[in-house]
Amino acid sequence: MKAMQKPSVWASCAAALVLAASSLQAQNTNYVIDTFDTGVPSQWWATWWGNGSISFDSGQDANGDPNSGSAYITADTIRGQNTYVVARSFGGWAWDNGKPVNFTLFTNLQIWLKWDSQNSSMPLSVFNTSGDRLGVFIHPQSASWDGGRLVSLGTVTVPEEASNRWVRIDVPINPQLAGIEEATALVFKRWDPSANLNHTIAFWIDNLELQAAVAPPPPPTVSVAPTVTGLNLIASGSGQYQRQSIYTRGDTYGWVGAPGPVTYSVTIKKRPEGGWNGFQAHIFLAPTQDNLPWGVGDAAIDWNATNIVFVQISGGAGPGASARFMVKTNQGSGNSMLWSHGTLATVYSEQDEGTWQVIFNNNTDVTILTPSGTSTNFTIPAEWVQYFNGPVAVHVGAQPNSFANLGKSVVLSRVQITGVPTPLDDDFSGSGLNTELWGIAAENAAGVLVVPPTARYWFRWTLPADSDAIVMARTNLTASPWLELAAGPPIALGGARQVLLTTENLPSSSSLFLALGKRVFSKLLVLLPGETAAPGTPTGKTGTPTPQMAWTPFDVVVMAVDDNWYPVRGINHVIHLSSDDTMAVFPPDAAMVNGTVTFAGAYFGSEGTWTITATSVDDPTKTGTSSAVVVRPLQ
């Protein structure tokens, strides 16, 4: 390619490098989750939260089979427990040997449902038009045990005819949803507003089944996008109400009792791509003397804190935005006051990019100035101000407010706080977030980052894709090798992912080709006490095995790796251990969970220098041998 002043970039998914979903099968079939023929499997079904419960009912069956039954779900909407979650685990957790389910292989989830009109005090019409209706989610394996990172498949409206008969409900599956290729649980979730309290909800479900896709999902497509320097606040979590914020390390930022005006300002450098559409930037002022149940770094401090000042900047599809000033007092774990009598002012600006200022002229008098020069002035009731008299921490962040906004971002180029004992002024021009000034309070911290001046491109790919995809570069399409880039973990963008490429992790050249690759399981790495995995090194590990004593138990860790010793997730092979010490004793064969298994209680039986070999029972060509370890006689 001809040399140019600015490097030319090509994004490639060449045939040899095509990345498909990690668990594609030659021929896919329907996946029957449960038919409840003889009961509700207690090892898989459980109430995760709230007053929901699930039990077996032999008197109801979607097929009318007298020898079968169904699952009966009930919930009581009482105060403090008006969110209830019932889940069906597939396995793949740290404590079991189950396997997560790849939802990208299926087109829809089939549910048969019947509403119990006799025992439900909440009418079905109210259930369908308030709260969350019936939310259907999956729990991705990468979330470990984090209920806040559920991935929504959709919200179900229960047909009215379900009041007197069984109905089939189909929930479509979007294969581009991040995390659905590794579902450890199917989750039913509902939240009810206060108007729905003190009701009972009851219904039956039966014949839960994933319908197979006729063809495997297409491979991902890749692209490059320009970067914008500054504080990038990306909705990279899975929840529509995720907060992606930074917060002040100090709490000397209160306005009450200040000798002069106190100003909190944010400068928006770039609005969300495609318009705000409900996406918001925000400022939270949180008194730290309050009972903050999750601390000052709480990612949902506006909900959990007892008292809060909330300044929301948001708009519609076009340019322009409004600032809304809200206060809540004496309302922990709630926000209804904010959106009712706690809203004190709203001001519109035709120009949304620029500096927004909230100026406390004194304890109660407030002015908001917008980038276009419009302003508003208002008063906070004195009886509310008393709750903010003392130390105050500041959160600055963003929130998508709808699933359609997942992956969108807003970029800030400056945050200032003036008129306080320790003024703050940060233009986010460094190589990363100033952690002496700021902490991160976010559902997904990877989406809160300072993009430095050395940033060159965002490299993006669509889903479904392998969760351990690698980004590669070469400077000549035919004559140079592909180089794996140290790009760091990808950032989720709803139905896509991206990594930041900088001058530090890209080769220097006038032309550049980028591609997405997939790690291929080729061998096993065996780690003994004293050793640590070191991907990309000649042996894949560092350290020296700790000498062992004969007949003394120790742990052996086995990992699925590629040719360069990088871990390969999603492998669940059964592993067998053996040794050149014929007297060695090992635990029974065990299955990997997400590419790793630990054998506890292995021991050698003879003095000498020995090795341990791991072999996949599922594919005996996948093996690995440990470093030699010295075994001393039992003392």
Image: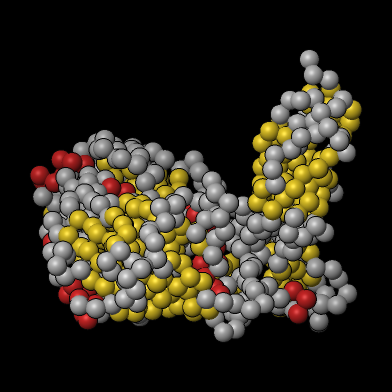
The residue furthest front is 67
Decide: is 70 above or below 365.
Answer: below
Q: Quadrant of the C terminus?
A: top right
Q: Residue, x 35% and y 42% (percent of image)?
A: 294
**Measured from the top left, where is residue 22 in percent x and y?**
64, 68
Q: Residue, x 13% and y 64% (percent of image)?
A: 121
**Measured from the top left, where is residue 263 in percent x and y?**
30, 51
| Left-right relation of 594 to 399 | right
The residue furthest top is 635
Residue 550, by quadrant, is top right
Res. 321 visible in picture: no
Q: Quadrant of the N terminus?
A: bottom right
The residue furthest bottom is 214
Along the line of sight, the residue nearer the viewer: 632 or 627: 632
| Left-right relation of 211 to 336 | right
| Left-right relation of 176 to 63 | right
| Left-right relation of 310 to 27 | left
Decide: is 304 above or below 207.
Answer: above
Along the line of sight, the residue nearer the viewer: 385 or 286: 286
Decide: is 362 above or below 14.
Answer: above
Q: Residue, x 19% and y 56% (percent of image)?
A: 77
Along the line of sight, the residue nearer the viewer: 361 or 466: 466
